[in-house]
Amino acid sequence: MDRYRNKATILSLISMGLGQIYNRQFIKGLIYLLIEAYAIIYFSSNLGRSLWGIVTLGDTPRMRVNGKWMEGDHSIFILIQSLITILLLIIFVIIYIMNVRDARKTAEKREKGIQPNSFKQSIRYVLDYKFAQAFLTLPAIGILFFTVMPIIFMVMLAFTNYSAPNHIPPAKLIDWVGFDTFRDLVSLKTWSHTFYGVLTWTIIWAVLSTVTTYFGGLLVALLINQKGIKFKGLWRTILIIPYAIPQLISLLVMRNMFNGQFGPVNQYLGYFGFGGLPWLTDPFWAKVTVIVVNMWVGIPVSMILIMGVLTTIPRDMYEAAEVDGANNYQKFRIVTLPMILFTTAPTLIAQFAGNINNFSAIYLLTSGNPVVGDYQYAGATDLLVTWLYKLTLDQNKYNMASAVGIIIFLIVASFSIYNYRRTKSFKEEDMIQ
Amino acid sequence: MSGRKVKKSLSLTLSYIILIIMVIGSVYPALWVILGSVRPGKSLYSKSLIPSSFTLEHYRELFTSKSYMFGSWYMNTLKISIISMLIGIVLTLLTSYAVSRFRFRGRQTALSTVLILGMFPGFMSMIAIYLLLKEFHLLDTHLALIIVYAAGAPLGGTFIAKGFLDTIPRSLDEAARIDGASNFRIFTRIILPLSRPMLTYMALTQFVGPWVDFIFAKMVLRSKEKWTVAVGLYDMVSTNTNSNFTMFAAGAVLIAVPITILFMFLQRLLVEGLTSGASKG
């Protein structure tokens, strides 16, 4: 029995909404028809040009004709417009498929003698059974255009020659160059020297900053939690202050405090008879400064976290250890430390990944300076991510910047995905419910 | 006294000393900047921590001076942060409720996608967003900032919110459903009231965002009267630190004090928010 089925399918294939109207769902059909009408108007004027655009990235440069500048193609605008059009096309195709499936399904129901849903009933159906999908549409569109599209765009830039001074629209066109940017980054002497230098410091920084804040926090938490320490709540509240002050403020304040000429840190060193140190201007000391300041910012977070874990360790484990004659150090090593490490391991890895991308800690404090002479636009404390920022906004080396961005992404993503997959909440997620 | 007792009180004293040093270290920068903001003159350098005389001149100047439009920056930031907070929370709640409560095709994929997208450095998308905003003639408007902050909210907040919503027992939903409640009703009557701690946490982090983000705001907002406080403040420090320091200090205090008080007040919630999203064991 396929009285209605094939007809509805073919009709909706011919034009969106026809199948629905055939099924006597007039409002729904009309909405689909309107969508299609709009889409046809939009794509007929845009699709051809955007397909051409994404392949060629424009072919007429700005030219001088009879003494006047004639505007040529702006490769970047062409690229982004093409991208938007193609994304819209994908959305349109998805809606089209939905339309065909819907028409066929309704027709099947009609064959079985079920009345097709009225418009009101359709809405009701969506709210009851397709709630999640309906709910998610709005955030999904937001993420698509403000996150996914920009990322695709930037990934594409890494394969073009979009960079100052020779390939900046509108004066010049840009072109696809394949993997040349990456090749330059890792093998061309001037770039690779900077790249490996910055990469090394990024890793050193990520390891040191994570380890120092974590064990600093552990130490403070244990100190406060000791038997016999009074006013535990008070200590905790005061030591949490650095976490509560917005980082933007505290880092800018620190930048002033460590000022080599006028800052109070060197002033105090002077009182005690030491000479001032070039906190922010010497490559080595600048690195020390960012680590120390990061400890100041980061220790409170680890402290709160670890204090939370400490309260969950069952007392009887300690009692059992005491019965076996363990001293304080042994109790710490055998009971406390493993429990804490086990519970906070995901946070630790997340912090590590976060530190690789810790833009504000570096940029607000040192701006990546002091400048290193033989680096390409990078300073001694620059992380990959701040270097990326400088390459983009100060130097307009967009292709190099996005190549660096892709590399950062690969590093961070591999840690985070590993981390996410090993957490219990991921593995057991569907067992709870 | 036995040797053991001596050793114990010695270690306690040592602990107290370390704690006191740490307390001084934590509080000193805050104290220094507060005292700096009431110090006469403009210079970063001062002979002693506590100034010989106090003045509120810098605070007054922030709001009256022609070159620092702190008053309008403050209002701009307030407006942007409140609107983007409201939209951002709605979006995040929708997303996290949907992925926490419903099982549908592509759910795991959607979750992993959100997770992976969150790992791209934000600056990578900056240029594209800049061009996008330019296309729509939104550069140098507050609307642009609101859209971007709000659209970015689900990306950062979904996992934390989902982690929290997962802890609300499903039996509650099911009981309500048996009583005939629709999905929407369940959401507004059961989920929303129960997720108050998480809502507070999200509201706070969303609200604070625009106050402390200067990178993006600086890129979008060109004209000085449209700036947010963060842009203005960074501008004060990056140009001519030594001659502007006391003004910077006053501005910093005005931003930091409300936020710090909010955070201290909601400390417990923050800790919950911090740990609940991470993982359970």
Image (cartoon, coloured by chain):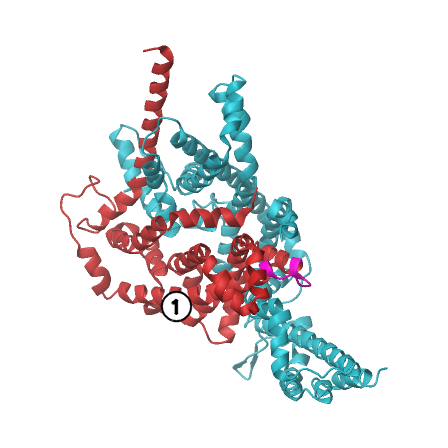
Side of A194 where A125 appears, left or right: right
* Amino acid type, residue under disc 1 in the picture: Arg
- Which residue is depicted at the point 17% across and 50% down? B40
User: Which residue range is magenta in the image?
Assistant: B100-108
How far from the left and from the top, in percent, is residue B211? 37, 59
Identify the image quadrant of residue A110.
bottom right
How far from the left and from the top, in percent, is residue A27? 63, 87
Can you identify the residue that label 1 sits on?
B222
Say if residue A397 shows up in the picture.
Answer: no
Give the chain letter for cyan.
A
- Which residue is depicted at the point 40% across and 70% down? B142
Where disc 1 sits, the SS reads loop
Side of A63 where A55 appears, left or right: right
Identify the image quadrant of residue B30.
top left
How far from the left and from the top, in percent, is residue A361? 44, 47
> Please, is residue A371 above or below residue B156 in the view?
above
Q: Callout 1: residue from which chain?
A: B
Can residue B78 be found in the magenta stretch? no
Give the chain letter for red.
B
> Please, is residue A136 above or below residue A377 in the view?
below
